[in-house]
C-alpha cells in the first residue's frame, strides 16, 4: 500500500519506451520515401493538362513523365509537345492490337498520327460527319504524317421508312449527292506527305452491299485529281480497286503531268482500257515516273503500243507491270522492240496476257542485246516449245538477268531447266559482286581518309614554311634564342655557386638551365638517318 494514497504500490515506468509510431500503411518504411525530384515529377504528371511542363526536363525525367502520363490527354496538349517515345508507344498499343513500328521508320509517334488520321477518314460520312472532325486534327498531324493508307470511303447514307439505314447509290433520285470526302483541303496542308494509298469501297456493309459502293464517282475523281496536283511532296500514288475507267484515268493523268516528285503510280485492279493507257503513256515522258503498275485492267494492243512508244525514248522508268490484261502479240512485239533501244527499264511483267511464240522470239533477241533488264515475267502465256527454245538459247548469252518466270507457258522442260539454271547462276554472281563492291567501297573510303590526312599534314607544313628564306630565318632565330638562354643560364649558375643555397628557395632557379641543357644536348646529337632523309625530302618539296 502507498503511504500517501493508501492504494497499491505503482512501479516506476519509463514512458519513453511505451511510445510507438504507427504508420497509416502497414508496409511503410523509411527506405520507401520518394525523392523530392520524384514528387515534383509526379506533380507535373498530375497537372500536365492544365500546366504542361516538358521541354525543360532532362532525358531521364522525360522518360519518367512519358511512362506515367494518362493516355486520355487531348492531342492538342501532347501532339506538338511530347516527343517520340514511350508515351506514343503506350497510345498505339492501347488503340490497336497489331503495332508493327518497322513500317513507320520505327517511329511510334508517326504510327499513331498516321493511323489516327486514317481512322477518321475511313469513318467519315458525307453530310453526316462534321468537317471540323477532320480540319481540327490536321494542324496536329501535318508534321508527322508521311503516308496515308485509306482502305475504305463511305458514301452518304439515307434513312428508310422503317428507320433502317441504307447506303445511297447512284440509282437513287439524289444521286448527285453521291460524293465522298473531298481531299483538296487535306492534301494541301499535309506538307510532309510522300505516299497516298486510296481505295473507294465499303467494308462490313452486310446485306446492304451494292456494286456502286466500290466505285469512285466522277466528282470524286475531279476533286482527288486537283488534290494530288496540289500536294507537291507526293512520291507514291496508289489508287486501286476503285472502278477507275478511261475518263477518270485521263483526268488523273492530266493533273499529274509534270508533277515535280511523283515516282510511282499504281492504278491496278481497275477498268482502264486503251484510252486510259494512252493518257498514262503521255505521263511517262512528262514526269519522273520510275514505277508504273497497270495490272488487272482491260488494256489491249492499242494501249500497249502507246506505252511501247513512250518506252522507246524514256530514261526514267525502271519497272512496268502489265499483267492480267488483254495484250496480244501485236502489243507484245511493240514492247519488245522498244526494249532494244531502251536502256533504263529493269523489271517487266507481262504475265497472264495473250502473247505467244512471236513475242517470245522477239524477246529472245532483246535478251542478247539488252544487258540492263534484270527481271522478266512471262508466266501464264502460251509461248510454246519454239518460244521456250528461243528464250533458252538467248538467255545463255545474258549475264544480267536474275529472274525469268516462264511457268504455265507450254515450253518444254529442257528449255525451262536451262533458263532456271542460267538465272540462278546470274543471281549468285550478282550477289557476289555486290559483296565485293561493298568491300572495295570500304577500302577506297579508308584510302581517301588516309590520303586526306596526309594532305592536311603536308598543307600545314607548307603553310608554316612558304619559302627557303623564311625557313632559314626561323631556324637561325631559334638557334640565337637558345644561345642567349644558354648565356643567361651560365650567369645564374655562377651566381648560385657564389651564394650558398638555402633550403628549397633556390631550387626553382635551376629548373630552366636544366631544361636548356637538355635542349642543347638534343641539338648536339645527330638525327636518325630515316628522320633526316624525310626532313630533307620535305624541305626539298617546299
Image (cartoon, helix red, strand yellow):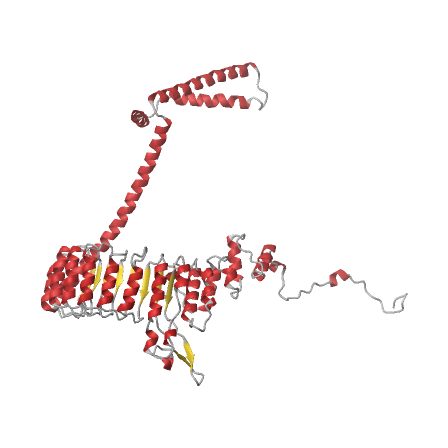
- The answer to whether residue 130 is seen in the rendering is yes
From this view, report whether residue 113 is shown above or below residue 460: below
Displayed quadrant of residue 108: bottom left
Q: Is residue 468 left or right of residue 19?
A: left
User: In this rendering, is residue 465 above or below 445?
Assistant: above
**Depth check: 249 or 527 in front?**
249
- Total number of numbered labels? 0
- Tell me which corner region of the image, top left, top right, bottom left or bottom right, holds residue 195: bottom left
- The front one of 175 and 38 is 175
Residue 402 on image: x %, y %: 20, 59
Q: Which residue is drawn at 74% across and 61% down?
A: 17
Task: Give residue 151's position: percent from left, percent from top.
Answer: 36, 69
Q: Which of 326 and 416 is in front in this view?
A: 326
**Which quarter of the figure is the N terminus placed in?**
bottom right
**Residue 36 x %, y %:** 61, 55
Quadrant for the C terminus, please: top left
- Furthest-bottom residue in view? 162
Residue at the location (36% across, 76% down)?
175
Name the residue at 49% across, 16% down: 488
Counting from the top left corner in percent of width and height, residue 201 is at: 35, 73
Could you tell whether 76 is left or right of 368 in the image?
right
Extreme-left residue of the structure: 386
Q: Can residue 421 be seen in this view?
A: no
Corner quadrant of residue 456: top left
Amino acid at each position: 500500500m502507498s503511504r500517501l494514497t493508501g492504494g497499491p504500490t505503482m512501479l516506476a515506468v519509463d514512458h519513453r519506451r511505451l511510445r510507438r509510431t504507427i504508420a497509416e500503411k502497414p508496409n511503410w518504411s523509411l527506405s520507401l520515401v520518394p525523392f523530392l525530384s520524384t514528387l515534383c515529377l509526379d506533380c507535373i504528371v498530375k497537372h500536365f493538362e492544365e500546366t504542361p511542363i516538358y521541354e525543360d526536363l532532362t532525358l531521364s525525367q522525360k522518360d519518367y513523365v512519358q511512362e506515367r502520363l494518362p493516355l486520355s490527354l487531348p492531342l492538342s496538349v501532347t501532339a506538338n509537345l511530347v516527343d517520340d517515345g514511350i508515351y506514343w508507344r503506350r497510345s498505339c498499343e492501347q488503340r490497336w492490337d497489331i503495332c508493327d513500328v518497322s513500317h513507320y521508320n520505327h517511329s511510334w509517334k508517326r504510327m499513331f498520327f498516321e493511323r489516327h488520321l486514317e481512322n477518321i477518314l475511313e469513318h467519315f460520312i458525307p453530310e453526316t460527319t462534321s468537317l471540323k472532325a477532320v480540319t481540327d486534327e490536321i494542324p496536329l498531324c501535318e508534321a508527322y504524317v508521311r503516308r496515308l493508307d485509306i482502305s475504305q470511303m463511305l458514301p452518304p447514307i439515307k434513312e428508310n421508312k422503317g428507320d433502317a439505314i441504307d447506303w445511297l447509290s447512284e440509282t437513287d433520285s439524289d444521286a448527285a449527292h453521291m460524293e465522298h470526302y473531298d481531299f483538296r483541303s487535306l492534301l494541301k496542308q499535309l506538307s510532309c506527305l510522300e505516299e497516298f494509298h486510296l481505295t473507294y469501297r465499303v467494308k462490313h456493309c452486310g446485306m446492304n452491299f451494292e456494286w456502286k459502293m466500290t466505285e469512285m464517282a466522277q466528282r470524286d475523281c475531279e476533286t482527288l485529281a486537283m488534290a494530288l496536283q496540289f500536294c507537291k511532296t507526293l512520291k507514291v500514288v496508289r489508287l486501286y480497286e476503285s472502278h477507275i475507267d478511261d475518263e477518270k484515268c485521263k483526268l488523273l493523268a492530266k493533273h499529274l503531268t509534270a508533277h515535280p516528285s511523283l515516282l510511282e503510280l499504281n492504278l491496278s485492279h481497275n477498268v482502264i482500257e486503251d484510252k486510259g493507257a494512252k493518257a498514262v503513256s503521255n505521263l511517262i515522258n512528262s514526269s519522273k515516273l520510275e514505277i508504273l503498275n497497270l495490272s488487272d485492267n482491260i488494256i489491249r494492243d492499242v494501249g500497249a503500243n502507246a506505252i511501247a512508244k513512250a518506252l522507246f525514248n524514256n530514261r526514267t522508268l525502271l519497272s512496268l507491270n502489265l499483267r492480267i490484261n488483254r495484250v496480244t502479240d501485236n502489243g507484245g512485239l511493240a514492247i519488245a522492240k522498244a526494249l532494244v533501244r531502251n536502256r533504263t527499264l529493269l523489271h517487266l511483267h507481262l504475265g497472264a496476257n495473250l502473247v505467244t511464240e512471236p513475242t517470245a522470239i522477239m524477246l529472245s533477241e532483246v535478251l542478247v542485246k539488252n544487258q540492263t533488264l534484270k527481271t522478266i515475267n512471262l508466266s501464264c502465256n502460251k509461248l510454246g516449245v519454239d518460244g521456250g527454245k528461243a528464250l533458252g538459247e538467248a538467255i545463255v548469252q545474258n549475264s544480267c538477268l536474275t529472274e525469268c518466270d516462264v511457268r504455265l507457258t507450254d515450253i518444254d522442260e529442257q528449255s525451262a531447266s536451262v533458263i532456271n539454271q542460267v538465272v540462278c547462276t546470274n543471281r549468285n554472281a550478282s550477289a557476289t559482286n555486290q559483296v565485293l563492291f561493298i568491300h572495295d567501297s570500304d577500302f577506297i573510303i579508308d584510302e581517301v581518309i588516309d590520303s586526306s590526312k596526309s594532305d592536311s599534314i603536308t598543307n600545314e607544313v607548307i603553310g608554316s614554311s612558304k619559302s627557303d628564306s623564311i625557313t632559314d630565318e626561323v631556324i637561325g632565330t631559334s638557334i640565337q634564342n637558345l644561345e642567349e638562354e644558354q648565356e643567361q643560364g651560365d650567369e645564374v649558375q655562377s651566381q648560385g655557386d657564389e651564394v650558398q643555397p638555402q633550403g628549397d628557395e633556390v631550387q626553382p632557379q635551376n629548373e630552366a638551365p636544366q631544361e636548356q641543357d637538355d635542349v642543347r644536348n638534343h641539338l648536339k646529337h645527330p638525327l636518325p638517318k630515316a628522320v633526316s632523309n624525310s626532313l630533307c625530302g620535305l624541305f626539298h618539296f617546299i
